[in-house]
Image: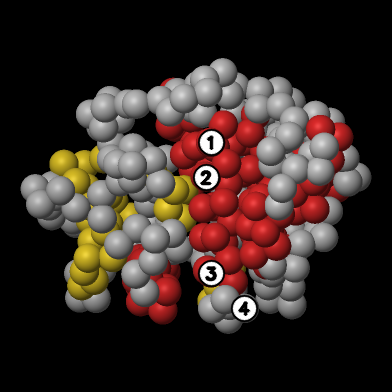
């Protein structure tokens, strides 16, 4: 490795090294080495290009700078880390906040879809939280742009049945929608789908179209449609979330149970508690399990 220190190291992954700069921003630097050197540079360049295509948006972390010669990408710092880590640490997040996160997650996926971008690794580890606990979709280094190929795969619990990408079968929006459904399940329950069983068994059940029980869970209808490939646009998810309740048995997002939603008020947390955000520097390739 031949990377000059630029700040405080906060994450190391297969594609890049992530540091916190003195300015308060985050810098991602592609790994330089014999193994996958060119590929890592290309992945980080793709992430920079996708930020440019999307432009500034409330659903996104702000891009600050890109240096092609150094293969470095500077991004806005998210003080409350990943959705995954935050909800694990603070399970009493209010119902209102969770519903806002679901809507923001769906809006982020919809934004990508409008420009023919498939994220390819939708999960709570790839959504970041700002100082006001607003959700931002992140990490596009392994994404598919205009049906391009990718080596990235989501964790087992966020990968739908038959989602095995090849040159003849590139990623599709359905793949992101499945991950969105599992992410909504995580937001509502505080656990990943089938968290208690091994990944190989999760994969077997998914292939058999066997998914976690949703009876009585908020947003059950939204989750089920994502899992069963009945969603054509992430905007449909946004619209369903905003639909007034149709009774406790409907599974709409204002009826049913939130397993860990023990607090009815907002939970205040100092941004110093979660010192390092989860800016993942690589994605895919593992059975993970990204719980």
Give the labeled residue for mark 1: 96
Q: Are marks 3 and 1 in contact (CB under 8 Å)?
A: no
CA separation, marks 3 and 4?
A: 13 Å
CA separation, marks 4 and 1?
A: 36 Å
Which residue shows up at 52% across the image and 45% down it?
100
Q: Is residue 230 above or below residue 273?
A: below
Task: Single out the mark in the foreground, 2 or 4.
Answer: 2
Residue found at the very far top of the displayed protein? 262
Task: Single out the mark in the foreground, 3 or 4.
Answer: 3
CA separation, marks 3 and 1?
A: 25 Å
Give the labeled residue for mark 4: 147
In the image shown, does 20 or 224 lie closer to the viewer? 224
Q: Are marks 3 and 4 in contact (CB under 8 Å)?
A: no
Task: Single out the mark in the foreground, 2 or 3.
Answer: 2
Q: Position of residue 36 (x, y in %)?
A: 41, 63
Residue 112 tag number: 3
In the image shown, does 281 or 233 lie closer to the viewer? 233
Give the labeled residue for mark 2: 100
At label 3, counting other C-alpha atoms closer than 10 Å, the crowd grade (few under 14, some 14-19, many 20 or more) is: many
């Amino acid at each position: 490795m031949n990377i000059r220190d630029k700040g405080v190291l906060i994450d190391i992954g297969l594609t890049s090294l992530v540091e916190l700069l003195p300015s308060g921003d985050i810098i991602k630097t592609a790994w330089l080495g014999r193994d996958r050197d060119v590929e890592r540079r290309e992945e980080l360049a793709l992430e920079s290009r996708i930020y440019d295509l999307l432009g500034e948006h409330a659903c996104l972390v702000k891009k600050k700078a890109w240096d092609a010669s150094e293969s470095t990408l500077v991004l806005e710092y998210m003080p409350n880390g990943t959705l995954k880590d935050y909800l694990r640490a603070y399970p009493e997040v209010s119902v209102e906040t969770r519903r806002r996160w679901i809507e923001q997650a769906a809006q982020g996926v919809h934004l990508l879809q409008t420009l023919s971008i498939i994220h390819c690794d939708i999960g709570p580890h790839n959504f970041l939280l700002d100082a006001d606990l607003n959700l931002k979709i992140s990490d596009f280094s392994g994404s598919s742009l205009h049906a391009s190929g990718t080596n990235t795969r989501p964790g087992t619990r966020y990968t739908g049945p038959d989602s095995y990408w090849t040159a003849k079968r590139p990623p599709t929006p359905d793949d992101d929608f499945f991950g969105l459904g599992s992410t909504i399940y995580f937001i509502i329950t505080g656990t990943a789908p089938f968290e208690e069983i091994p990944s190989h068994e999760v994969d077997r059940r998914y292939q058999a179209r066997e998914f976690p029980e949703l009876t009585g869970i908020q947003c059950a209808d939204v989750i089920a449609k994502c899992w069963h490939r009945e969603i054509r646009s992430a905007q449909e998810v946004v619209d369903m979330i905003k639909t007034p309740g149709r009774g406790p048995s409907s599974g709409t997002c204002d009826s049913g149970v939130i397993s860990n939603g023990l607090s009815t008020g907002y939970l205040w947390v100092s941004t110093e508690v979660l010192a390092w955000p989860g800016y993942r520097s690589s994605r895919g390739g593992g059975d993970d399990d990204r719980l």
